[in-house]
Image: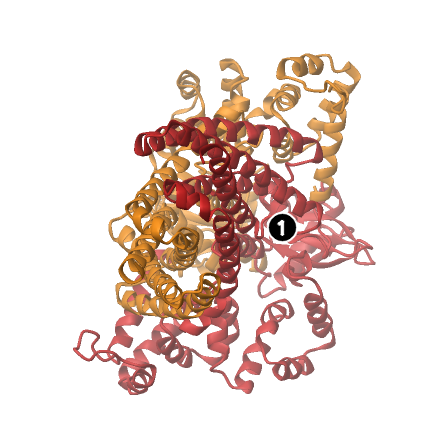
Chain colours: A orange, B red
Amino acid sequence: MHPDELQQHLREVQELLAGARPAEDEENGDRDGGELSFALVLLAPERADALRARLDALHPADIAYILEALPLEERRYVWDLVKAERDGEILLEVSDAVRESLIETMAPHELKAAAETLDADELADLAPDLPPEVIQDVFQSLSNDEREQLRAAMSYPEDSVGALMDFDLVTVREDVTLEVVLRYLRRFDELPDHTDKLFVIDREERLMGILTLETLLISDPEKQVSEVMRREPKISFSPDDDAGDATQAFERYDLVSAPVVDRGNKVIGRLTVGDVVDFIREESEAEILSHAGLREEEDVFASVWDSVKNRWAWLAINLITAFVASRVIGAFEGSIEKLVALAALMPIVAGIGGNSGNQTITMIVRAIAVGQVEESAMKRLLKKELGVALCNGVIWGGILGALAWQLYGSVSLGLVMTAAMTLNLLLAACAGVLIPIMRQRLGADPAIGGSVMITALTDSGGFFIFLGLATLFLL
Amino acid sequence: MHPDELQQHLREVQELLAGARPAEDEENGDRDGGELSFALVLLAPERADALRARLDALHPADIAYILEALPLEERRYVWDLVKAERDGEILLEVSDAVRESLIETMAPHELKAAAETLDADELADLAPDLPPEVIQDVFQSLSNDEREQLRAAMSYPEDSVGALMDFDLVTVREDVTLEVVLRYLRRFDELPDHTDKLFVIDREERLMGILTLETLLISDPEKQVSEVMRREPKISFSPDDDAGDATQAFERYDLVSAPVVDRGNKVIGRLTVGDVVDFIREESEAEILSHAGLREEEDVFASVWDSVKNRWAWLAINLITAFVASRVIGAFEGSIEKLVALAALMPIVAGIGGNSGNQTITMIVRAIAVGQVEESAMKRLLKKELGVALCNGVIWGGILGALAWQLYGSVSLGLVMTAAMTLNLLLAACAGVLIPIMRQRLGADPAIGGSVMITALTDSGGFFIFLGLATLFLL
């Protein structure tokens, strides 16, 4: 469906639900959850039928989209109207936060029924959100093969290829003709999603090469698979590979699917661009959210308390660093008492350091992520960033120094301002290069928390440098 | 190639280049660009040959990766070794900043030769970076069809489907059998990248349906295209569609390719998951960079001056807002002189407001981006965020108020601290909800600049609230 149509569907669903809502702009329109659920239960049967019919016609991903856009009570009402056999697919599509809100409303037998409609790799994605007893029940109902697959899929760490792969393999032997392959494919009712190539394996299921559907279609059917298959370059992954590296390979080589092999080169699974796109999206969301200290994507309609819990850690850390900075200022209270202009000027020194440091660290983290920063480049990068900091210090520090001079009529105050800004920018540049590189060398993710650390440093450092210089030279 | 192998290649290239480098840890190892280029030109011929052979064996995307990871002089040296006929492909793969550094080194006739190896849609991507006279030359050398395509591709705005689409269509008629389609495909030497479906068109080239390769392969070859093709749901885009919406549709329906049609439903191009993946990556990079006020991906090896230019606008804006905040403090210098503790405590009040406001705005911007925020939800979101702010104000404001009381032995100072933090958090919540919603209503991108605006507001606002309350109640 075209995106505009989807928006249209959302609006129509909202209109159908609106019949059940107390009018919002009534004087005492302050509705609470209980009242609303009550109204929704009483939604006229013909409206409920219209809504159900509309939902049945939609793709699971579209239903997921609509569920995410609805406030809690309405979301639950709509969720109840969805056909039970589609529950599993839809749970896979919604965001984690919304999934939780839907699973809460379901009885164990409903969850089990929903889970049983899924493949092993999909089940592995859903499992962490399911109650343990439901997982056990589902596990019992699987075939041996599926159990093995589920166990495998759940055993790999979250950001590994193993956690992303599926088990929908179409494999062929190399000693048959394309005609035989074509006949073999005609026996399928459908091919797995994203099948753009078949994996050519030997008797021990080891990967011998790749037969693309393209090759299959444009080649003479009389030819043997071994004649037309591609042996090199053979892009395959191990389940232990980093998922981020694998997604970069997908981007670089424009892949649609790729085999996953074990140590013995035996084909055990498949990675598809669909999973890769989801991974890229989730990673970048997580990175953007982490900049604001949000631990996970938050359901915009989550309760106040859930939101407070999602956000508290970051605020706590920031308060601690702010408190430290405040104590640095406290140490110079005598100086501020003598020259109160310092109090007004000090946040400028701290602020510019934080901004500039965040620019540096963002650059370096990205360069590390794509593998551009080697040991050998570090000295060079540090020198460059110090150069940038010096430039900015002279330019912006000079301007602000001149302004301080104008405002407070003291040349020496202006000079201290310029010097402090330059020094704090140099501090920010050092920290911006060194923090992510040190974190990487220690095996930590260079992206996480860097912004907090650098802001803490440039705040406390900025106050210390400025107030310290002022105490030395002005008082 | 597997990501680990690529890293290995990069290291080997760096080792081959290292022979030409003056040893880095010599006492006077401070080398400048001129000296180094000289050394590189003198790279022993057998080493240069080894390097060239290695490069020839690599995928263009891998060469692009290696070029991006090399400092300027070495990058240029390697670039000269690459076979000229691969220049075009590689220029498409490197980041914008690195592309600029490569194009600078090329003569117009080299650029023309590189450009002529590309398709119209690829040329359109490269064109903005090429000198006008090169584009004119290339344009002259194109066929009429290609000129039309190039003109079309360049006429669409950057974030539209038209700018992403390619023109590699494989179309069939509905009144032929699959056998005929299979025979037709066998006449191709290769199919366009990412061909997972053929577009079924009528005599006027209007889109009638979709024939997936899967259907083609699993169906009886005697059947007519019209019998097996999919008519609905027919996911197609218009070149004027927003590229972001289209990428969401690709994610939602796990598409590999989709037709682009004009107003008359005539097929004019094709969107593929390869372009979509690139777009998602670029968008998220841009968003992450914009958080630190970086205008574009910066070449980590760019010159100091290029970096200063890339970063100055953000620093300037932040200095202006910091200056305004400083003037707010300036207005209360009398109060600070009387009670110097205010100077030490005020950055805490401002800081927590900024952090909390950024959490809110990040949430709301993301909700708007996926279409979750409708007019009707605004009041509800505002109420929720105010609730979260009140919670945080009471909890964190209470703790900090108690600390202030401990430190300075004044209950009323502690109470003012708590009240100021709560009020600033409420201000941050309001601004965090309203700024992005207002920007969207005014037709601006809700994501851009929100963080700067909210920090400016909570800084100046925080100082004003805290110092104002203190002046009213403490002095």
Q: Is there any visible trace of residue A9 in the rendered image? A: yes
Q: Is residue A368 left or right of residue A115?
A: left
Q: Which residue is mark 1?
A: B244
| Image point (74%, 76%), residue name | B144
Q: Nearer the viewer, residue A2 or A428?
A: A428
> Looking at the picture, how far across and down is residue B291, in whole percent?
49, 52
Q: Nearer the viewer, residue B80 or B130?
A: B130
Q: Judging from the image, what secondary structure is the residue with disc 1 in?
A: helix
Q: Nearer the viewer, residue A395 or A345?
A: A345
Which of the 4 image quadrants contains residue A378? bottom left
- In the picture shown, does residue B437 fall above or below B64? above
| Image point (61%, 49%), residue name | B247
Q: Amino acid at mark 1?
A: Gly
Q: Quadrant of the C terminus of chain B?
A: top left
Chain of the residue displaying label 1: B
- In the picture shown, does residue B250 fall above or below B98? above
Q: Quadrant of the N terminus of chain B?
A: bottom left
> Looking at the picture, how far across and down is residue A429, in whole percent?
34, 61
Which of the 4 image quadrants contains residue B73? bottom left
